[in-house]
Image (tube, helix red, strand yellow):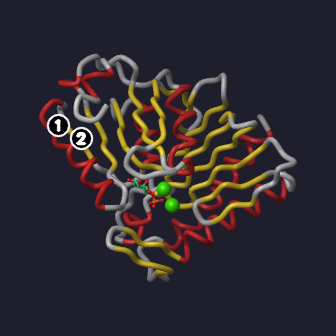
Amino acid sequence: MNQYLDAALDAARAAGALIRDHFGRPLTVNSEEAHDIKLELDVRSQALITDLLLERFPEHAILGEEGSAENAATEFEWVIDPIDGTVNYYYSIPHFCISIALRKKGEIIVGAIYDPMRDELWHAESGGKAFLNNKPIEVSQSTDISQSVVSVGMSKTTAEIEVGLSIFQDLLIHARKCRMMGSAALDLAYVATGRFDAYIERSVNWWDIAAGVLLVNCAGGRLDIAPSAVQSGKLSVLAWNGKIDRNQLTSIYP
Ligand code: IPD
Ligand code: CA
Ligand code: CA
């Protein structure tokens, strides 16, 4: 197996075990906002992942939600969300994951997402297939929005929530069902697995989506990623099975 993929999977499993062990137990809150919570465990999970990766590849750079380590001398950068779905985690809702990707010269070459509560481990390498627990996966076959289940993310600020809400409202009427699950990385993994037909969020960071973007691509789906019009420095993402007409998914907010 590719040494990078191997490292990503080992780190995802190790961090998954850490956060699963603490699930439902008292947690230390580092900071709280109106629509977000940051935990000491977010930081510990990232430290564990970073240590494991840098032990094998000491020269690689890190871009993580809980901190980054730049290195202009390397073409390799790990993109890490140590707990994606922290608010779910804090409220003992078992829907969150660890997301780890590797970029080489900016191109995502490895992706791993681990849901430790369901023991579901997704992975992909650029140019290959996407896998869930080592079985190949594919996006869904739906061709029309009326037969589709679409996940919409709304992130954290009032502006982000307002945009997300207008998309959600439109899709609630046109799709079979809409969902808001609280983990962008799992939303993408679910699109790759055919559980969701599409996922839309207008304000995310690379650590939320890097691994999932590769999964969706390798599972035969399509993605539109652009700078966010809602929050500068963030990204807008639409991921879908590639079979539904894109216009049906973006009529409210192109
Ligand atoms: C958040 C989750 C959520 C999404 C937000 C993300 P976090 O990540 O993925 O589903 O709507 O945009 O920031 O804070 O739990 O790592
Ligand atoms: Ca996240
Ligand atoms: Ca996070």
Splitting the image into four quadrants, where does ligand 1 fall?
Answer: bottom left
> How many labels were placed on the picture?
2
Q: Residue at x 70, y 40 (%)?
A: 103
Would you say the residues marked 2 and 1 are in contact, meaning their CB atoms lie under 8 Å apart?
yes
Q: Assign the C terminus to one quadrant of the image.
A: top left
Q: Is residue 200 above or below residue 78?
A: above
Place residue 87 in its image quadrant.
bottom left
Amino acid at circle 2: Ile
Q: Secondary structure at mark 1?
A: helix
Amino acid at circle 1: Asp
Observer-nearest of 190 and 210: 210
Q: Is residue 14 above or below residue 197?
A: below
Tag 1 residue: 170
Q: Secondary structure at mark 2?
A: helix
Q: Residue at x 38, y 29 (%)?
A: 194
Q: Residue at x 45, y 49 (%)?
A: 204
Tag 2 residue: 167
Place residue 157 in its image quadrant.
bottom left
Labelled disc at residue 122: none
For disc 1, the neighbor class at 10 Å (few under 14, some 14 to 19, many from 20) is some
Residue 3 relative to residue 62: left or right: right
Spatial CA distance of label 2 from label 1 is 5 Å
